[in-house]
Image: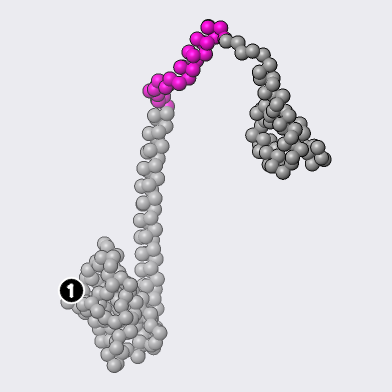
Amino acid sequence: MNANCQPFRDLLPAYALEALDPDEARILETHLKTCPDCQASLEEYRAVSEGLLFALPPKAPPPRVRARLIARLAAAQAPAPSVRRAWPIWQLAGGLALAVLLVLNVSTLSQLQTLQRQQGTLTKQLQTSQTALALVAYPEGRTLAVTGQQAAGTLILNSELKSGVLFAWGLQILDEAHAYQVWLIQPDGRRVSGGLFRPEPGQPFVSVVIPSARPFSDFTGLGVTVEPSGGSPGPTGPKVLGASF
């Protein structure tokens, strides 16, 4: 047996008796695949272990031992009877309290989300109002009436500036698939998009800042149409508001 077999020498007797730890057995089996010396030693140990097994004649156990063993095997194989578990009152109370807390947390989260949406709307309206006041205070600021069949509004702008503010009321609340789109009308009749907006339910009016890459003096009017929620490259829906500059 060479030096490489030294770590496995003490494992061979236990392996022959099938008494080796599974992890050690796997390591030894890997070594045995490439070591003829250890394979030969293992055969010798197995021959000895088999001789020990048959060294004494078999002896039948006493009847009482056999009956006791059969009774234990039957008890082990019999299914355990089902037991209804009675929950203590403190566990029931704790579960009820947990359910109540869960409902309260969901309700609080919903209220918080509603307040956040309302705060966002108010912040946006405040910023729009500040822009409108700035346009009115700016020299040569103009206020124009915006009219429609069922809605009306006011447009505040300055011809040399690149933004205006539209206040509109009487507009219908649209579904999620549609929005109002603002159009700035050029002298040749072509329309340039001035943005999308959607009125908030329960609000008396809507205020919208209209940005433009060019001064408003480059345009002759404004229109508002109903378009898909993502906007359109040109007007496709009905016109609901309009004004001439």
The verdict on residue 89 being magenta is yes
Residue at x 69%, y 42% (from the top left corner): 33
Q: Where is mark 1, residue-wise? A: 150
Q: Nearer the viewer, residue 241 or 37?
A: 37
- The residue tagged with tag 1: helix, strand or loop? loop
Residue 232, compared with residue 99, is above or below; it is below
Which quarter of the image is occupied by the N terminus? top right
Residue at x 46%, y 17% (from the top left corner): 74
Left or right placement of residue 70 versus residue 81 in this view? right
Give the crowd class for mark 1: few <14, some 14-19, many >=20 residues within 10 Å: few
Q: Nearer the viewer, residue 235 or 133?
A: 235
Left or right placement of residue 118 versus residue 30 in this view? left
Horizontal and vertical percent for residue 241? Answer: 23, 78
In this view of the protein, can residue 242 be seen by the observer? yes
**Which residue range is magenta in the image?**
61-90
Which image quadrant for residue 7? top right
Which image quadrant for residue 121? bottom left
Horizontal and vertical percent for residue 113? Answer: 38, 55
Q: Nearer the viewer, residue 126 or 187?
A: 187
